[in-house]
Image (cartoon, grey):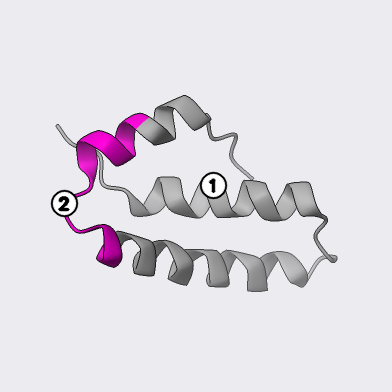
Amino acid sequence: MKDVKIGKLKKKLIDGVDAPYVMLNDAFDLFNKKWSAAQKSSPLDRKDMDDLLLEALNEAIPDKK
């Protein structure tokens, strides 16, 4: 799993989200795919679930240029 920094994620949310509902929907779709893939190797603990959710949110927010 990637290491996602909370501060960087907050900045992306503030600067990069024009349609929050669409972004959240995309993030949870990504999370479900990542969770399913991760479950194949072993059950996830709470920290792993949090990291997976942050990673999915980070990927769902577009980078503004």
User: Circle 1 is placed at which residue position?
Assistant: 54
Q: Is residue 12 magenta?
A: yes
- Amino acid type at circle 1 is Leu
Picture disc at residue 4: none
Q: Is residue 65 magenta?
A: no
Give the magenta part as a residue range.
Answer: 11-22
Residue 49 in the image: state x and y as whole percent. Answer: 70, 56
Task: Tell which tag, 1 or 2, sits nearer the viewer.
Answer: 2
Left or right: 60 as drawn, with respect to 46: left
- Quadrant in the rendering for residue 16: top left
Q: Residue at x 59, y 40 (%)?
A: 2
Helix, strand or loop at mark 2: loop
Local crowd size for mark 1, using a 10 Å CA cut-off: few (<14), some (14–19), many (≥20): many
Residue 65 in the image: state x and y as whole percent. Answer: 14, 32
User: Circle 2 is placed at which residue position?
Assistant: 18
| Above or below: residue 40 compared with residue 61 | below
Residue 39 in the image: state x and y as whole percent. Answer: 75, 70
Local crowd size for mark 2, using a 10 Å CA cut-off: few (<14), some (14–19), many (≥20): few
- Amino acid type at circle 2 is Asp
Q: Magenta-highlighted stretch: main secondary structure?
A: helix
